[in-house]
Image: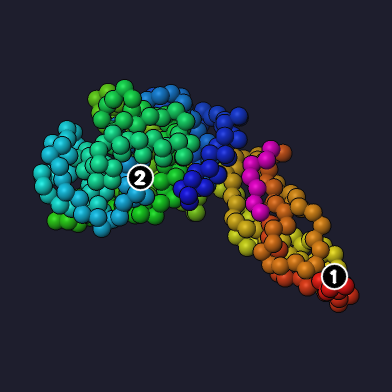
Amino acid sequence: MLLRRLAALGIALAALFSLTPCQTHAVSTSASSAILMDVDSGRVLYEQNADAKMLIASTTKILTALVAIREGDLSDMVTVSREAAYTEGSSMYLKVGEQLTLETLLYGLLLCSGNDAAVAIAEHISGSQERFADLMNETARDIGMEHSSFANPNGLDDEDHYSTARDMARLACAAVENETLVRMASTRSVTIGGRTMTNHNKLLNQVEGCIGLKTGYTMAAGRTLVSCVERAGQRLVAVTLQDGNDWADHAALYDYGFSTYPAKLGTSLGQTIQRAAVENGLNATVPLVAADSFAWPLAEGETLELDVELDGTLRAPVRAGDKAGEAVFSVNGKEVGRVALLCGTDVAPRMESALSILKQGLPG
């Protein structure tokens, strides 16, 4: 449920800006398809052919890990099948009958890009790759990946296995809300289950603030890369598909994004936005505090504006935590988000009002 709520927020905001996507020639990539997205707002900062259906290779494993972490337990013991051990392509070199924890397999999936690990995980969680793919597609729909289809857990080429740069950015935004997945994807090297594994993602060493996520390659898909970088509390995700210069392209996208669209904090959790009048209260007003934080990436010349919409007149008694309205944020007159406003303190009724309330509750 948490995943769905987080994804729904990001998708709604992304949809808002899809009406007028940011276009720029200040940065470019060698990719056939690319996108740069702000995680918390969902705002697209750069896009290039972002809705083309593409092969995505091992970046698929972001979704595999997300489903496995949600459905399994890291301490689960998994027995490696023959089918898993003999899976083609990149491998963590599993052996038939070997037993490892799900956590070990997830490291092998995300660091070594083990196709064998992906199959072992899928069989453990769902009994077969086919049934696991059903879970992947269900999760993809929940995230809002409207133009994606998953046929296997590892990203091997299949006509029914594809996505878009925009959908993969939405997946990345959901994935980085999962602390377990980020912990693993950001690990440069680990020794676990008798294996020492090193992360294939060179951006962890090359780009300041990189926290993962996943590389990919097949001959048909070319080089694919999904990554996330955090600087000064702002998180951006970049996706490039079929890109022979992906390491440099991601570095350039992040330098562009953070310098051109720094996040502007509209409000922080618990911050008092204004005071509202309270009828018949011991106090004439009550502070209205933000129920959540809100920030938005702003380009030069853009301004984040705040208006307050009250649900109605407040009458004592008022209890702290009662919803009183919403803070409405706009950029140059266009609404970009809302945050609920809560009463910050209790307000008791004046004595005469309290007596009136008491009398109303007494039998005639």
Q: Residues within 10 Å of mark 2 (few under 14, many from 20)?
A: many
Q: Quick check: can you spot residue 111?
A: no
The question of residue 339 being in magenta is answered with yes
* Badge 2 element: helix
> Circle 1 is placed at which residue position?
360
Q: Is residue 357 left or right of residue 259?
A: right
Q: Residue at x 28, y 42 (%)?
A: 126
Could you say which quadrant of the image residue 81 lies in? top left
In percent of width and height, residue 201 lies at 29, 43
Whether residue 103 is visible here, answered yes or no, is yes
Of residues 37 and 137, the one nearer the viewer is 137
Do labels 1 and 2 touch, CB within 8 Å? no
Looking at the rendered structure, the kind of residue marked 1 is Gln
Q: Is residue 349 left or right of residue 183?
A: right
* Residue bearing the label numbered 2: 67
198 versus 45 height, above or below: below
Across and down, in percent, residue 265 comes to 60, 52
